[in-house]
Amino acid sequence: MNPSAIQPTGPTRFLRPASRRFHRFTTLCALLFALALTATCFASGPYCAIAYSKSTGRYGHGEGYDSRAAAEYRALAECGTHDARVVGWVRNGYLSLALGRLVGTYGTGYGSDIYTAKARALKNCPSDNAHIVQTVWAGAHR
């Protein structure tokens, strides 16, 4: 069979060769755009954060927000002190805050499950008698 005798089939069979190339190019661009849009949808997710004030011992949290900044803003607002700092944040996971006996002694921990987050927070707190005071969660399901 003569290769020049082969005719294209499908929706592009009536297009000129240059138009066919343009059609392929625009289809490829649309596909890449759809893939990029899908990737950003999967990259975002629920965030949570914890803020802590070393001088007062107060803490606050933001849980289930669509951005890290929103979760941190809420945590700082809940803490309500001028010297509060965000001490931890996580996306799609658990975050725990452990406090020691002395004001200003703390540790944070994160994990995909509550037990890991709590264990890490206790390990990261320099006090021997640390205890968990806050655990927050951000994710699609529990």
Image: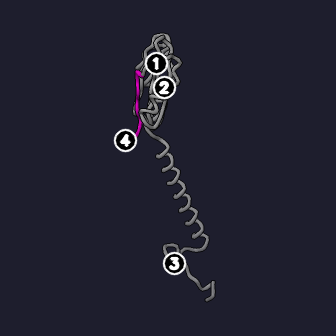
- Write the start and end of the magenta stretch as one range: 132-141
Kind of residue indicated by mark 2: Ala
Q: CA distance from mark 2 to mark 1?
A: 9 Å
Coloring basis for residues: one colour
Image position of 136 with respect to 133: above or below = below
Q: Are marks 2 and 4 in contact (CB under 8 Å)?
A: no
Between disc 3 and disc 1, the foreground one is 1
Mark 1, residue position: 130
Kind of residue indicated by mark 3: Thr
Mark 4, residue position: 141
Kind of residue indicated by mark 4: His
Q: Are marks 3 and 1 in contact (CB under 8 Å)?
A: no
Residue name at image x 55 percent, y 66 percent: 23
Q: Residue furthest left?
A: 142
Upstream in the sequence, badge 3 or badge 1?
3
| Quadrant in which residue 50 is drawn | top left
Q: Secondary structure at mark 2?
A: helix
Q: Residue furthest front?
A: 128
Q: CA distance from mark 3 to mark 2?
A: 63 Å
Kind of residue indicated by mark 1: Ala
Residue name at image x 58 percent, y 83 percent: 6
Mark 3, residue position: 9
| Quadrant in which residue 21 is drawn | bottom right
Image position of 35 with respect to 58: above or below = below
Label 3 packing within 10 angstroms: few (<14), some (14-19), many (20+): few
Upstream in the sequence, badge 2 or badge 4?
2
Mark 2, residue position: 121
Upstream in the sequence, badge 3 or badge 2?
3
Upstream in the sequence, badge 1 or badge 4?
1
The numbered mark at residue 119 is none
Q: Secondary structure at mark 4?
A: loop
Upstream in the sequence, badge 4 or badge 3?
3
